[in-house]
Image: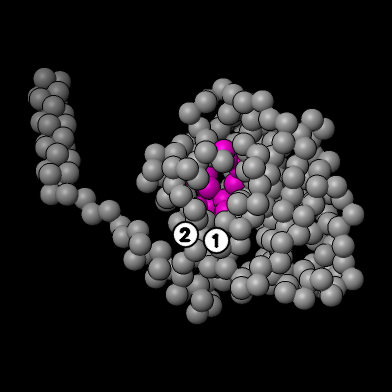
Amino acid sequence: MKVKTADVVILSYCKDIEYFKLNVACINSLIESEDEIEFRIVVVESNKNWLREPFRYDMNNVHVIVPENDFNFNKFLNTGIAAGESELVILANNDLIFHRGWLSEILAIRNLRGDILSFCPFDRKSIYLKWEKFKTNAYIIGYRVPIEFVGWCVVLERSVFGVIGPLDETFDLYFQDNDFARTLQHHGVLHALVPNSFVEHLGGRTTGIVDASKTKKYEIDKLKFETKWPPVRKSISHFRIRRLIRSIIFSVRQRLLRKS
């Protein structure tokens, strides 16, 4: 897959100079990360007073959209996605630092495995992923959150949305990434983590909450997710097959013991 341009959707809540500096650091690192790829960046801004703020981006190809409605994670992502036209789409938080060649590493896997259409980079400082465990893998296919799938940065082909449709806007804050991953899996869209694609996620800067699980909103969104994606119950036949296999293994072991 030869890529010359990529649409990037960055969600932002730029309410003061510190948040603006965070955004600028993210965008600058993205622009500087690749020499031969032009990033067309759409910042979807939650601060409705943005135009009154003294902050402005002086980078090329950065466009700001300020929706009139209140913040909704997936709705704002859908807004940014619709504003672009490049074959490759990158959905990103604003609290990221992109390292050199991160996207090239992903595209190398895309060229190797043309059937994988969705990817996530790797944060070597993640508390969830140990670099020593993953570094020998060129890619790992999976949908576990936050292992193979991390909602803070997803790279995928625009054609994927023709398969899965727009992101579910009932997920307005939490469990958006869980729903995204499950939707990809449900529609048979292969997704992979690429350990050599390094992007640092600063974390906790956007909402200001590190442990979201203690909030009422988290519980509400968790219930939404569990209602939409109930646990898959194993059928009786599944248990029967497992019991039969165990019985066969036991019988074989007993015969071997008798012979010995």
| Residue type indicated by callout 2 | Asp
Q: Which residue is found at the position 50% from the left and 55% from the top?
A: 167
Do the numbered discs 1 and 2 sit on residues whose CB atoms are within 8 Å?
yes
* Residue 243 placement, left or right of 190: left
Q: Which residue is found at the position 14% from the left and 39% from the top?
A: 241
* Residue 52 placement, left or right of 194: right
Q: Work out whether residue 188 or residue 226 is closer to the camera in this orientation and state it.
A: 188
Q: Image quadrant of residue 110?
A: top right
How many labels were placed on the picture? 2
Can you see residue 202? Answer: no
Q: Please determine whether, in this image, residue 226 is positioned above or below residue 240.
A: below
Q: Which mark is residue 168?
A: 2
Q: Is residue 150 magenta?
A: yes
Q: Work out whether residue 179 or residue 150 is closer to the camera in this orientation and state it.
A: 179
Position in image of residue 181 (x %, y %):
47, 50
Q: Main secondary structure of the magenta part?
A: loop
* Residue 103 placement, left or right of 56: left
